Image (tube, rainbow, N blue to C red):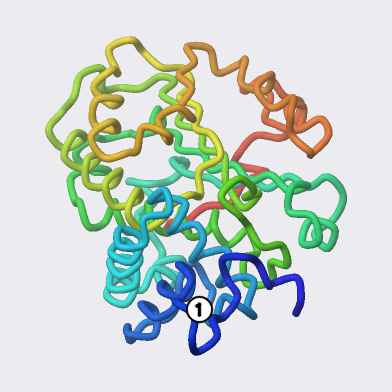
């Protein structure tokens, strides 16, 4: 497919040095687990979904091949051990996780058009931390919380339709990204309990490693001033260029005004009413990990 032939992804001739993407492809071939984000990785010179994923690892490391290979290796090893695609199929505790996470998808026209032009699809992951009923129950079991949070992330990535993607990315062009909203309205923990701090640190560190270059922008809404501890944790594990995408907002009702530049017309109005839009609430419009 000619469209897949980008400057960074063409397979080198025998007398030419390997390109950065081909170096990453060699790293994949050396591992027993070739899947990332629902894509079985193949030669990026001919497989656009693989080009997209491997280029994201390069972009996340500012083109440093050694660092990109290390991060990719850690991701492949983690996915082999954790099997995150299986975590989507699990049921999680209703008492601990109901109403805490949703994924919503908004299209400019239809799904087929968004595959041809991924800029016409917007995906938002919602983390409703104000909905936590019990800190001890929700954050007390680190492995359980991480599994639930990974399942939510995998549901979000699934909406990008990477296995059928047709547009290669570059350093400067990458439409395969997701908005995130963290809502702290009515939050019951105004200080930093040990469980929250420990769990948050582990989750932020993990997501930064195994889901690089997937964040478009992140909005922290209804944020109490005392929640500054969360930003301190984030800054420890997240690259400075990523922190620039973070937007704290004291009023969640103003969120809809932040999406004026989207290629999805009227995106702000499609959001739930409590976030300044005219759309249905998250329980009606979103999806999340199964709970029982």
The image shows residue 200 at horizontal and vertical percentages of 25, 39
The local crowd at label 1, few if under 14, some if 14 to 19, many if 20 or more residues have their Cα within 10 Å, is: many
Pick the front one: 249 or 119? 119
Pick the front one: 103 or 70? 70
At 36% from the left edge and 55% from the top edge, which residue is drawn? Answer: 64
The mark tally for this picture is 1
The N terminus: image quadrant? bottom right
Looking at the image, residue 166 sits to the left or right of residue 64; the answer is: right
User: Which residue in the rendered view is the most extreme toward the front?
Assistant: 15
At 32% from the left edge and 54% from the top edge, which residue is drawn? Answer: 209
Location of residue 33 (image quadrant): bottom left
The image shows residue 57 at horizontal and vertical percentages of 43, 59
Where is 109 relative to 10, above or below? above
Pick the front one: 259 or 290? 259
Location of residue 104 (image quadrant): top right
The C terminus: image quadrant? bottom left
At 60% from the left edge and 54% from the top edge, which residue is drawn? Answer: 170
At 78% from the left edge and 47% from the top edge, which residue is drawn? Answer: 120
The image shows residue 108 at horizontal and vertical percentages of 83, 45
Looking at the image, residue 70 sits to the left or right of residue 274; the answer is: left
User: Which residue in the rendered view is the most extreme toward the bottom?
Assistant: 14
Q: What residue does disc 1 label?
A: 41
Pick the front one: 117 or 122? 117
Where is 37 relative to 291, above or below? below
The image shows residue 276 at horizontal and vertical percentages of 68, 19
Looking at the image, residue 276 sits to the left or right of residue 196; the answer is: right
Element on which disc 1 rests: loop
């Amino acid at each position: 497919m000619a469209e897949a032939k980008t400057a960074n992804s063409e397979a080198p001739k025998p007398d030419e040095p390997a390109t950065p993407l081909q170096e990453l492809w060699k790293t994949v071939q050396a591992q027993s687990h070739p899947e990332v984000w629902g894509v079985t990785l193949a030669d990026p010179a001919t497989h656009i979904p693989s080009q997209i994923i491997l280029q994201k690892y390069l972009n996340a490391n500012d083109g440093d091949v050694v660092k990109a290979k290390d991060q990719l290796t850690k991701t492949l090893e983690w996915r082999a051990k954790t099997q995150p695609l299986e975590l989507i199929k699990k049921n999680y505790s209703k008492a601990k996780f109901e109403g805490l996470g949703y994924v919503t998808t908004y299209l400019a026209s239809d799904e087929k058009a968004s595959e041809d032009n991924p800029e016409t699809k917007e995906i938002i992951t919602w983390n409703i931390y104000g909905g936590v009923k019990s800190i001890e129950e929700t954050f007390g079991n680190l492995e359980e919380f991480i599994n639930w949070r990974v399942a939510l992330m995998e549901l979000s990535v699934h909406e990008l339709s990477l296995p059928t993607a047709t547009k290669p990315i570059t350093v400067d062009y990458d439409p395969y990204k997701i908005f995130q909203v963290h809502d702290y309205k009515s939050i019951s923990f105004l200080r930093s309990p040990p469980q929250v701090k420990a769990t948050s640190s582990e989750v932020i560190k993990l997501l930064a490693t195994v889901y690089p270059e997937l964040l478009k922008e992140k909005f922290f809404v209804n944020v109490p001033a005392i929640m500054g501890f969360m930003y301190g944790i984030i800054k420890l594990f997240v690259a400075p260029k990523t922190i620039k995408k973070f937007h704290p907002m004291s009023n969640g009702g103003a969120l809809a005004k932040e999406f004026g530049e989207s290629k999805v017309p009227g995106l702000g109005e499609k959001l739930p009413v409590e976030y300044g839009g005219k759309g249905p609430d998250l329980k009606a419009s979103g999806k999340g990990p199964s709970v029982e």
